[in-house]
Amino acid sequence: MPITVYLPEKLWDALMTEEHMPVVITITAVIDETPTIKTFVFDKLFDFLPGQFCMVWVPGVDEIPMAFSAANTITVMKAGDATAALFNHKAGDKIGIRGPYGNGFLPSGKVLAIAGGVGVTPLFPLATAGEVDTFILGTRTADELVFPEELAKVTDLKIATDDGTRGYHGFVTGIFDQLDVTEYDTVCVCGPEMMMRSIFDRLAAKGIENRGQFSLHRYMKCGVGVCGSCCIDHEGLRVCRDGPVFTGDSLKDNEFAHHHRGPSGRRE
Ligand code: FES
C-alpha cells in the first residue's frame, strides 16, 4: 500500500525552490585516496568557499552532507549506508547535489590549518588557494594520509601519524605544541571533535580561542536551517546555516566535544 509522507509546511516551502533542488551531475572519475576514502569528480563546477558543504543525494538511499574538496569534487570516507552506496558508484553514474551551503572558513593574516583524517577535505581547497602558511595533517597511519603530496607543494606541511609510519610519531597536538601559535592570526581546524577540542583548549589557555575556526559535523536532514536536526545545544545555533565553521569564542559553553544528536534527536 503506498505511503504518503507529509513534510512540515515550512520545510516543504524551504526546499521546493529552484535554489534548493538537487542538480543531477554525472560522475566523471572516482579516485581511490586510501582504503576507505575516495574522491568523486563531477562534470559540473560549483562556486563555493572552502569549508562550505553540499547535500549529496544518493538515489534510492539517502541524502548526506559532504564538504567540497574542489569546485568539482567531494572526498568521502566510507562510514555508513549512504557512503557505502556512494562507493559503489563509478564514472558515468549520476547523483544529485544541492548547495553549496553554510559559511566556510574566513581566514586572515598568517594561517595555520590542522586536519585529522578525512577532515582534510574542507581545508584542502583553502591550501590550494594559497591561503595556508602551515598545515598540520594527522592520521592513524601513513596509508590513511589524503593529499600529502599536493599539500606539500602549496604550504609548509607537517605530518603526524599515530603509529609513526610517516612524519611525527603522535597526534597533531604534538606538532601544535612545538609551534609558537601566537604567531598565527587564524587557526582553521577540521577533524574528530575530541581532536578539535584539544586544539580549542590549547588556544583558550593562551586566551586566543577567538582565532580558531572549527568545522563541525552534525546529523543533517534539510541542510538549509529549517528542520533543527543539526542544532547545537544550548544556543540553538544551526550547523548547516550558522556554520559549519564556528569561531572558538562561539563554542565555549555548549555541547562542543560533549555530545551531539542522532537521526531521532537523541543525544549521542
Ligand atoms: S539540517 Fe535542518 S536545520 Fe540544519
Image (spheres, helix red, strand yellow):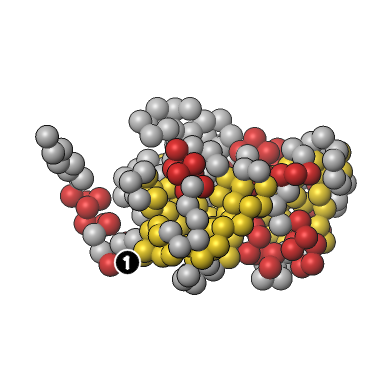
Residue 228 appears anywhere in the view: yes
Residue 31 drawn above or below residue 248? below
- What amino acid does circle 1 point to? Glu
Q: Nearer the viewer, residue 44 or 32?
A: 32
Q: Which residue is mark 1?
A: 19
Q: Quadrant of the N terminus?
A: top left
Image coordinates of residue 217 in percent, x first then y, are 52, 44
Image coordinates of residue 40 in percent, x first then y, are 54, 58
Residue 131 drawn above or below residue 79? below
Q: Residue at x 57, y 45 (%)?
A: 77
Residue 48 appears anywhere in the view: no
Q: How many other residues sit within 10 Å of disc 1, few (<14), some (14-19) or many (≥20)?
A: few
Compared across the picture, whether 73 is left or right of 231 comes to right
| Corner quadrant of residue 172 | top right
Residue 194 drawn above or below residue 147? above
Q: Residue at x 64, y 35 (%)?
A: 194
Secondary structure under the numbered disc 1 in the rendered image: helix
Q: Residue at x 48, y 70 (%)?
A: 43
Compared across the picture, whether 56 is left or right of 39 comes to left
Q: Nearer the viewer, residue 100 or 209?
A: 100
Q: Residue at x 58, y 34 (%)?
A: 257
Compared across the picture, whether 110 is left or right of 193 comes to right
Say how many tags the image has: 1
Image coordinates of residue 95 in percent, x first then y, are 40, 57
Q: Is mark 1 within 8 Å of ligand 1?
A: no
| Corner quadrant of residue 108 | bottom right
Image coordinates of residue 141 in percent, x first then y, are 77, 39
